[in-house]
Image (cartoon, coloured by chain):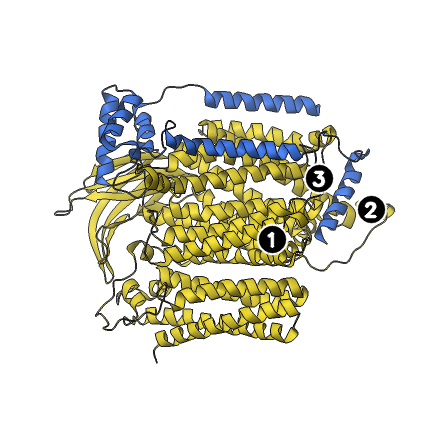
Amino acid sequence: MNGRILIALALLALAGALVFAARPHDITADERVDQITAQLRCPVCQGLSVKDSTSETARQMRDLVAQRVREGRTDAEIDAEFRAAYGDWIFLAPPVASWSGLVWLVPIAVIAAGLVLVTGRLRGTGAPPAAEPTSPDVAALRERVAREEAAEG
Amino acid sequence: MSAADLGAAALRAALFLSLWGTGAAIYAAWRRDVRALHSARIAAGISFGLVVIAALSMMFALATHDFTVLYVAENNARETPLFYSIISLWAALEGSILLWTAILAGATAFIAFRGTLTIPRLATTALAVMFAMLTFFLLLVTTPAADPFARLAVAPENGNGPNALLQNHPLMALHPPLLYLGYVLTSVPFAYAIASLILGEGGDRWLVATRRFALISWGLLGVGIVAGAWWSYAVLGWGGYWAWDPVENAAIMPWLTSTAYLHSVMVEEKRSLLRTWNLALVVATFALTILGTFLTRSGVVNSVHSFSLSAIGPILLGYLVAILVLSVGLLLWRSARLRDAGPIGAPLSREAIFLFQNVLFMAATLTVLLGTLYPLVAEAISGAQLSIGGPYFDRVEVPVALALLFLMGIGPQLPWHGASRATLERQFTAPIVAAAVGALAALVTGTTALPAVLTYALGAFVIATVLQEFARGVRARRTLHGEDGVAAFSNLFRRNGRRYGGYVVHLGIVLIALAVATSQARTVDAERTLAPGDSLQVDGYTVRLEALRPVSEPQRDSIVADLAVTGNGADTQLRPALVQYPNSTAAVGSPGIGAGLRDDVYTILAAYDQRTFSWATIRTRVIPGVSWLWLGGAVVGIGAIIAALPAPRRRVVRMPVAEVAVSAK
């Protein structure tokens, strides 16, 4: 098979798989409880989530979340209830609004600044310095081995 | 004279020798004085011996329960088994600093004898830097800051015993020493980098001299981190292996910058670029190890590892500031001599990928640093209490990690300077097909979360590139050297260990990535309160509570749940327990783990009827693929060893083309 067709087919299959994985799908009530409790801090533990902790407090909080889910509350309503009781501290990921938004902004800013810095120092064109060897196999292999041996020394 | 007296005296003598060695090494480097160098060398050797004697004395005092020593009284009890007594050397602050000092003394002695013979001036200056750092640590252990041999006027009848979490699993013998070795060995590249800056050398000699050290300390840190994850998994009893705890963060930060360095250093070797940057990475790696020690040993952050508090915090902070001021000052002073010549390659060249990789590693490191420190800063400034935990780090670091996985597949396949279209097609056809297969394999095996599917695709992509490299290397050796397949394969590693060992490391990282993705995406939980004889079902397994019984040992009392696990071809007994140590208020959960290549059955005794033992709450997690994580850690370690082993001396045989043709038949 032609190499390019093969690449195109593989990319198509890959894209299909990713789209399938990203498709919106219903989640069960248990999964919702897990999702919500994974974001909540167990107040009596050392940085563990309510989902992971085996403490009695965490168990009660899990039961409360499960009850709220059964009652048909939305995630936002359940979050608001915990925020009212404990403050932002109860969430293991800080809110994007307010000062704590900085912790979300900084990683993005660092990556952006780094990319700008690096791209600025790259050579403009993508042209390789030397011509490709014409008979691919042995020539390429020998060149490769020579390079490796030079690297060892 | 007791062992503790001997240890304390040895440390004082070592301090004296270390001070002497610092002066002698400085004088030797400055005046090129051979006799002073000789004297510094002897001082290094003897002080290493003395610190080892001190560490052994402490182990002896622990093993013989000498409670006149405060450290022993606080961290040991008559009932502590011998094994845990001995490894209690690193159970608390003072002993840990002593171990640290011993490793640092060993590294100093090694440099004194090896380095100064091959590159005298640079290594002698580096030796002076090492001596200065050793002196600092010896000052810590000979003053009340972290004196391991501080005595009690009246010895108590019995000691407190080690922290419950530290005497619950044999992995404690492995994980801290590995990490400390990794931490301390980062000081060798640092010392050479500082020496190079002080001497104003523009060249890369410091880098060549410390390449192996950087690699070894990186490997030890990596394996130590995985061992720590394993300890956390086997001891802390919540069914996970990584919680973005401040101490875990402190360990991963220098590993991240060190990984960045190991790659960007190749750009300097090949293209003489990035000199300032590489020096900065070495300084950052070292400074992060000190920052980590400060964070975890000063009590400023809450952590499962905050085993001890002491006045050492401000001292370590001062040390860190001094190191940063010195390093940054030197870098600025010498920056004119470190200018790079010319631009970097094209966007699709190996050096460009290394740079993008560096950007991502920096972002990852800063994210961890920020997430660890921000709650402290926010509380200090505004009094607002904030939590930054797993969900934050996952959301930021997972995309960064996926991007890094992608670059890990691309980088090694691109030539230096730039790639042509034909090269790209030749290098990437098979890996792209593999990526598609990987994504489909994830879906077929039931791993359907998007990050996990991406991880499988990228993991397969990287594996394919590595296998392709192995295959081409073997083919090239067969053609050029006429070796058979097996010899050619093993010679790849022996002759060019750095490159092919690096690929093995990449395979290990892929295994770790797959383990994390699989376990995060498909862990199933069930929690039931069972009476003896009852069972719960989870993910095809049946977990039956057979009995609940108390067990008494000299050093602890436990409640053990006997569980029979059947289903999915399994038929095992697991014994999760709640363990009560006399020195700990809360019982420590000890999980019962049935490990397997496919999945682990992780059981926890969460609660039980304390009066009649008539019921127990059993939490069961089925965690798929988590064993690959430990396996991946081992593969990373093996790859690092391959890469660090020196290549054998070679006979250079260049065969004419005609002979190649003959031997190919």
Tag 3 secondary structure: loop
User: Which of labels 1 and 3 is toward the front?
Assistant: 3
Do marks 2 and 1 both belong to one polypeptide chain?
yes
Residue B103 as seen in the image, left or right of residue A114: left
Question: How many labels were placed on the picture?
Answer: 3
Q: Which chain is blue?
A: A
Q: Is residue B429 above or below residue B342?
A: above
At numbered mark 1, what does the secondary structure look like: helix, strand or loop? helix
Comparing labels 3 and 2, the label whose residue is closer to the camera? 3
For label 3, the crowd category at 10 Å Cα-Cα, with few meaning under 14, some 14 to 19 and many 20 or more, is many
* First-in-chain label (1 vs 3): 3
- Look at the image and tell me in which quarter the C terminus of chain B lies: top right
Chain letter of disc 2 in the image: B
Looking at the figure, which quarter contains the N terminus of chain B? bottom left
Horizontal side, residue A22 vs residue A3: left or right: left
On the image, numbered disc 2 is attached to which residue?
A: B660
Residue, disc 1: B642
Image point 40% across, 61% down: which residue?
B96
Q: Which residue is mark 3?
A: B416
What is the drawing colour of chain B? yellow
Residue B539: x and y in percent read 35, 33
Label 2 Cα neighbours within 10 Å, binned few <14 / some 14-19 / many ≥20:
some
Q: Residues within 10 Å of mark 1 (few under 14, many from 20)?
A: many
What's the residue at 28%, 42% (across, down)?
A45
Tell me the subunit letter for badge 1: B
Q: Is residue B170 visible?
A: no
The quadrant where residue B88 appears: bottom left
Residue closest to the eye, B538 or B428: B428
Q: How far apart, in angstroms, are the residues tagged by discs 3 and 2?
A: 27 Å
The residue at 30%/35% (across/down) is A89
Q: Indicate left or right for B373 with B405 as reference.
A: left
